[in-house]
Image (tube, rainbow, N blue to C red):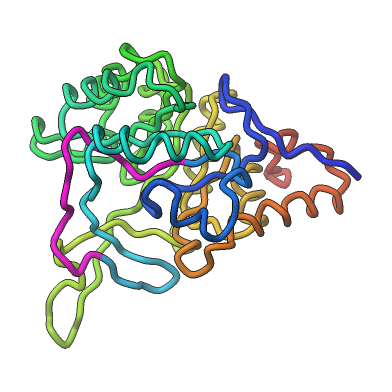
């Protein structure tokens, strides 16, 4: 049986729903050693900032039960070097490129958007607003509706590209934050960023990360991500959602899609298994055929409440 893996993210049509999660790779050269990037539905790059960042002190990563903590600090070469060195290489790989951007102020988001406006080779922007707002006591942008709307509007008022707001799950009601992003012009949302966590070395009696706390990723957070996707899809209906957080297999991808995701990103799993992504694409096609499902898009939001 022939099946259709293609999905739509607003105006974007992807050959399949599986993409990379920002932050687990630089700009794709690492993954291209293992499989053609054209296997992906889209490539989401590591977040780039206006100026280069060296990142936080080490240790930056710590393994946890069913997950991983990291406090990298958005290490990246800055947008100018990225545009000159990385984007041209990526744009030649036959894969839609979604650039992730991060900033410390609303003005910085606007300046980044201006820098990326009209740049050839970009399919969309993912705006990482799970960053501290240095002009607002260091409170993460996407923890409140006002700063969410301001940061997203600074981008959507500048570019014509589709824009996806990447949200933190560390809020009371993520659907309200997602609605604020869409009201500010976002095409859709990416759910979820890492959860804030902490691990302690009990012999040394100090945090295992130099920064003290960090972002928890991996299978431990997948139920939180599925809940967030389902919550936002139930509230906002057709708004495109990129689901991410602990996804490893085709079954995990299906779980996200049935919760309401249009596309699904895989990240932490690739540290242990770089071939997790192409395997998930292949297994997803097999699952659909085995279950007489003609398309993955037809399963979006297909979860049943079991009559409850």
In this rendering, the answer to whether 37 lies above or below 198 is above
Query: What residue occupies the far bottom of the structure in this picture?
Result: 203
Res. 184 visible in picture? no
Judged left or right of residue 220, residue 154 is: left
Judged left or right of residue 266, residue 76 is: left
Judged left or right of residue 212, residue 12 is: right
**Residue at left 55%, top 32%?**
233
Q: Main secondary structure of the magenta part?
A: loop
In this rendering, the answer to whether 129 lies above or below 199 is above
Judged left or right of residue 267, residue 94 is: right
Instruction: Residue 123: give x, y in percent of width and height.
Output: 49, 26
Q: Nearer the viewer, residue 111 or 81?
A: 81
Instruction: Residue 133: give x, y in percent of width and height.
Output: 15, 35
**Residue at left 16%, top 36%?**
51
Res. 129 visible in picture? yes
> Which image quarter is the N terminus in?
top right
| Residue 3 lies in the magenta-colored region | no
Instruction: Residue 113: give x, y in percent of width and height.
Output: 29, 22
**Residue at left 66%, top 40%?**
16
Q: Nearer the viewer, residue 24 or 90?
A: 90
Residue 263 quadrant:
top right
> Which image quarter is the C terminus in?
top right
Residue 117 quadrant:
top left
Region of the chain picked out in magenta, as a range:
44-60
**Residue at left 53%, top 33%?**
96
Instruction: Residue 170: give x, y in percent of width and height.
Output: 31, 46
Q: Nearer the viewer, residue 214 or 226?
A: 214
Q: Nearer the viewer, residue 258 or 44?
A: 44
């Amino acid at each position: 049986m022939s099946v259709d893996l293609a999905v739509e993210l607003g105006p974007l049509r992807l050959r399949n729903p599986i993409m990379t999660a920002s932050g687990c790779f630089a700009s794709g050269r690492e993954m291209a050693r293992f499989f053609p990037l054209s296997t992906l539905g889209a490539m989401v790059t590591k977040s780039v900032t206006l100026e280069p960042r060296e990142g936080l002190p080490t240790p930056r990563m710590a393994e946890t039960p069913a997950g991983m903590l990291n406090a990298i600090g958005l290490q990246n070469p800055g947008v100018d070097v990225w545009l000159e060195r990385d984007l041209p290489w990526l744009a030649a790989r036959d894969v839609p490129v979604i650039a992730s951007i991060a900033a410390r102020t609303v003005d910085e988001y606007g300046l980044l958007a201006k820098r990326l406006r009209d740049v050839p080779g970009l399919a969309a922007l993912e705006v990482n607003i799970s960053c501290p707002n240095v002009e607002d006591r260091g409170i993460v942008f996407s923890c409140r509706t006002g700063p969410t709307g301001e940061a997203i509007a600074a981008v959507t008022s500048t570019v014509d590209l589709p824009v996806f707001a990447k949200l933190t799950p560390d809020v009371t009601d993520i659907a309200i934050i997602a609605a604020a992003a869409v009201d500010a012009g976002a095409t859709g949302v990416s759910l979820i960023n890492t959860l804030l966590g902490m691990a302690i070395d009990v012999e040394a009696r100090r945090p295992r990360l130099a920064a003290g706390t960090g972002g928890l990723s991996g299978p431990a957070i997948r139920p939180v991500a599925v809940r967030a996707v389902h919550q936002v899809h139930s509230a906002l209906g057709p708004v495109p959602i990129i689901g991410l957080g602990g996804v490893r297999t085709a079954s995990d991808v299906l779980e996200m899609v049935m919760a309401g995701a249009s596309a699904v990103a895989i990240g932490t799993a690739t540290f242990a298994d770089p071939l997790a992504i192409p395997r998930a694409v292949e297994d997803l096609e097999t699952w659909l055929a085995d279950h007489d499902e003609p398309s993955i898009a037809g399963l979006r939001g297909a979860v049943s409440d079991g009559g409850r």
